[in-house]
Image: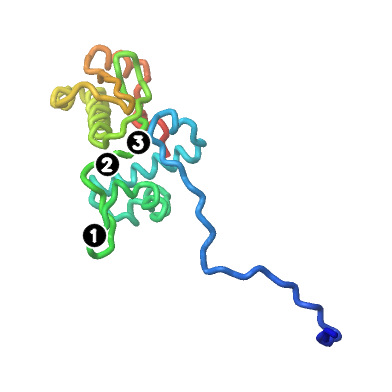
Amino acid sequence: MERRKPRRIGKKPRSRSPARTSRAAPRKRVAIPRTRGQFLAMSVQAQDRWTRMTRVIRTMRVEGVSLQKASKEFGLDPRFVIRLGRSALRKTANGQYKAKPTDRLLRVLRVLTLDGLREVATRDSRLATLVGEHANAVQNYLQTGDDSALRKLKRRTITDASGKRVRLLMDLEEINRRGSAGVLSFEYLYARSA
C-alpha cells in the first residue's frame, strides 16, 4: 500500500513552475535589406532606423568619433548598430569598434538626375559618398554661384544596387531651373531620413 504525505494545513500546495533555463529568449531577427524593394517593404520605423544606422557608421568613418557618440547623435542603441552594421565595423584590440574604410550596406538615396530627383539604392559606401558630394556641390552652386565643386567631381554616373547606371545632373542651367522652382532643399539627400 502506497503512503501519502500528510497534507499541511493552512498552506496552499505549491504549483509546479517550469524549470528556469539559463538561456535568454531568442532575439527577434531583423532583416537586413539588400535591395530597394526589400528596403521599401520594411515598416517606416524600420526604414528610419536602418537609415540612421548607416549614418552612424558614416559619421564614425568621416569624423572619427566613437560608436557610442555617433549612436547617441542619431538616437540609436550602439548594440543595434553592431547587430545590423557588423559587416561595416571592425573590433580593435582594445575592444572598441571602428568603421571600415568602405562597406556594402544598402543605402536608398535621392539622386539629382536629368529626370529629376530619383530614389536610388546603392550597396557601395563610396558611391553614397559621391552622391553626397554631388548634393553638396549643387547646394554650394545654388548658394554662391561657384560651380568648381561640381567640375571637380571625378565621376558623373553611379551604378545602383540592381546594376543600372544613373547619370548625375551636371547641367548648370537645369540646376538653376530646379533650384528656383524650389525642388532642391538641404535635406533632399536621404530618401528616408531621421
Is 120 above or below relative to 62? above
- What's the amino acid at mark 3? Leu
| Residue 145 lies in quadrant | top left
For the residue labelled by badge 1, is the local secondary structure a helix, a strand or a loop?
A: loop
Indicate the quadrant where residue 34 lies.
top left
Give the number of the disc on residue 116: none
Element at label 2: loop
Q: Provide residue 148's location: percent of width, then percent of height.
A: 14, 25
- The answer to whether 26 appears left or right of 98 in the picture is right
Name the spot of residue 142 as percent of width and height, x first.
26, 23
N-terminal of the pair, mark 1 or mark 3, is 1
Please give the residue where the numbered disc 2 appears in the rendered image. 103
Describe the element under mark 3 as helix, strand or loop: loop
Residue 5 rendering spot, x and y as whole percentages: 81, 86
Disc 2 to disc 3, C-alpha distance = 9 Å
Disc 1 marks which amino acid? Thr
